[in-house]
Image: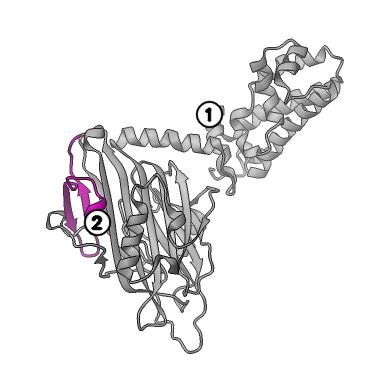
Amino acid sequence: MASLTPGDSSAAEGYGTPEGIVRVLQRLRGTLTELFLSAGINPAETRSSARELGLSKDLFWRVARMTLADDIFAQSSQIPPKTSIERVISAIEKNGVSTGLIRDVREAMREFEKMVKSTSSDRSTFEIMLPGLSSDNITQRQENVRKQAFLSNSSIWGVQAQTAFKAFFMIPSDNEDSMIDLANLSGLIDFRRLRKVSWPIYQRQIFDDKGVTYSQTVEPIENIPKEVGGLPIIPEFCSKPLPNLSWRSTETVRYYEIEPDLIGNAGSITCVLGGISRHSAGRYRDENNDRGGLIFELTTPVKLVNVDLFIHRELPFKMPPDVIIFDRLSCSHGYTPVMEDKRQLPHSNKVISLGSGTTGCSTHHIPGYLQMLERVTAKLGCSSEEFNAFRFTLKFPPIPTAVIMRFDLPVAPDNVSSHNSITGSCFPATPETDTQH
């Protein structure tokens, strides 16, 4: 929400904060509820109540549903226009309800309209603004807005995909008590061009808590075909023929793009990638790092993002991880933990536990997923049963953003040095930034 100066009318009226807006909404809902109770009207019995008042069922429901909603932040699209409320008031007024209650409802509606004009100028903008005022709120309205954004972004950029997925694996490094091997599996399922455009599919970049970039060697899960220029794809799980790619490099980053080709379903592509970084990150906190994080960059319009974390049972991290959706529009490069509060977007989807092993990880959104996971654990030299699994999903994720799984690093035991650790890693995303922070 935009910052407010002392001269702003919304600040003067107390509408410039979530608390001020909630007060107005609760007042309107409360006065309507009292009006229905006084008149002996049950808002949940739509047909009979509408018949009793001589109103259409749809008109009555538009007004009554506001009194039934539990989530005040989901109500912006449920608040009826003034004309609808007036028609219901007029019908109830004939039943001899207190004029004081009717006056209260009308005053509450006038204040609501004043608040909307003051904070956002119109109803449409207010409906977009309201769900974002609560960081622990997710509603059908939020999902609908993200879906609209997905459709708009698909049209604007000329691409879309069914699913973007990422699976992170963390295991203890061999012969090193303070380090971790980090592996990843990632991909785009049913990527389609809606017009002839090229599109970034992968990039690799590493940085630490201070935002300092450095290089790191990645061991591919499978042998890389020559025609993909070093992109660590797993051909068995990619569509055939393999994607037509171009690539370029700078001093710290290598970029890969899918070249223009057939549009729509005729040119649908599935691309699956995987890699391992040995001795990649420290498992304990040190003077530079207190937290670990795994970052999945999202810049492609997708219907679903699925992010899984597989953590070896010998690692001392407290789970499940926290997840934030990090703004990449105003902060397009890098990441440090101090940026989290200012740059995270609201969501309420929770990380769920999938238990031990990979048995419970199957999903129809990612064909062949269990086989992919087994391929990675075999490359790591582990049994899948040695891992505990956690999952985060979000429909129609906003772009550009990054999904960040965060966790606190423990203090190193007295007999183990922390090796000036790097605390997190983001492996190939779509497009992907292998990012350590």
Between 273 and 407, the one nearer to me in the picture? 273
Q: Label 2: state its secondary structure.
A: loop
Q: What residue appears at the point 36 percent right and 61 percent down from the top-left corner?
A: 426
Q: With 85 as the anchor, is 402 left or right in this view?
A: left
Confirm whether residue 437 shows in the render: no
Q: With 242 as the anchor, is 95 left or right in this view?
A: right
Q: Which residues are magenta?
A: 235-262
- Using the image, determine if residue 158 lies above or below residue 50: below
Q: What residue appears at the point 32 percent right and 56 percent down from the top-left corner?
A: 372
Asked whether 331 falls inside the magenta stretch, the response is no
Q: Label 1: state its secondary structure.
A: helix
Residue type beneath disc 1? Ser
Counting other residues with Cα less than 10 Å from the Cα at mark 1, is it few (<14), some (14-19), or many (20 or more)? few
Q: Which residue position holds label 2?
A: 234
Q: Quadrant of the N terminus?
A: top right
Q: What residue appears at the point 33 percent right and 50 percent down from the top-left corner?
A: 368
* Residue 131 percent coordinates (x, y): 57, 40
Q: What residue appears at the point 44 percent right and 57 percent down from the top-left corner?
A: 359
Q: CA distance from mark 2 to mark 1?
A: 46 Å
Residue type beneath disc 2? Ile
Q: With 206 as the anchor, is 245 left or right in this view?
A: left
Between 27 and 158, the one nearer to me in the picture? 158
Q: Which residue position holds label 1?
A: 124
Confirm whether residue 72 shows in the render: yes
